[in-house]
Amino acid sequence: MILEFARIADQLRPWGVRMSLSVDLSSPLKIDIPSVGHLTTFDPTDPTVIAWWQSKVDEIYKAIPTSPASSSKPTPKAA
């Protein structure tokens, strides 16, 4: 799903439109993690949950960079 959001962000970025994503805080319970399996908690103080969220944030920012300079597409010119 992140790649689909990245494609949308790529189309909007040249016009200065920034995307926001909302998350389901219980996601660690719902998404299977290949190396861990399902987590048993979504407690934000649990070290495993913290690591899970950090991994997801890194994945999102890698797919959807926040800097316009990171976009390879030219900025549209005003008519």
Image (spheres, rainbow, N blue to C red):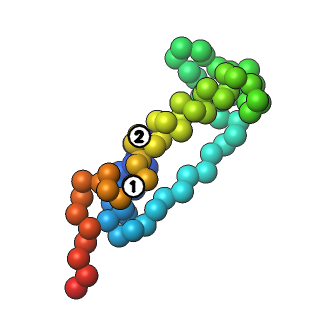
Kind of element beneath mark 1: loop
Q: Tag 1: Cα neighbours inside 10 Å, few (<14), some, or many (≥20)?
A: few
> Horizontally, is 19 left or right of 47 in the view?
left
Spatial separation of the CA atoms under disc 1 and disc 2: 11 Å
Question: Which labelled disc corresponds to residue 62?
Answer: 2
- The relative height of residue 23 versus residue 13 in the rendered view (above or below) is above
- The relative height of residue 58 versus residue 77 in the rendered view (above or below) is above
> Horizontally, is 11 left or right of 39 in the view?
left
Q: Position of residue 13 (x, y in %)?
A: 36, 62
Query: In what quadrant of the picture does the C terminus appear?
Result: bottom left
Q: Residue at x 70, y 23 (%)?
A: 47
Sequence-wise, the earlier of marks 1 and 2 is 2
Is residue 8 in sight in this rendering?
Answer: no
Question: Which labelled disc corresponds to residue 37?
Answer: none
Give the amino acid at mark 1: Ser
Can you tell which quarter of the image residue 32 is in?
A: top right
Q: Position of residue 31 (x, y in %)?
A: 60, 28
| Residue matched to label 1 | 67
Total numbered labels: 2
In front: label 1 or label 2: 1
Can you tell which quarter of the image residue 46 is in?
A: top right
Q: Residue at x 32, y 51 (%)?
A: 70
Kind of element beneath mark 2: helix
> Horizontally, is 10 left or right of 39 in the view?
left
Q: Residue at x 65, y 35 (%)?
A: 27
Q: Residue at x 43, y 53 (%)?
A: 66
- The relative height of residue 3 versus residue 33 in the rendered view (above or below) is below
Q: Position of residue 21 (x, y in %)?
A: 55, 52
Give the amino acid at mark 2: Lys
Q: Position of residue 75 (x, y in %)?
A: 26, 67
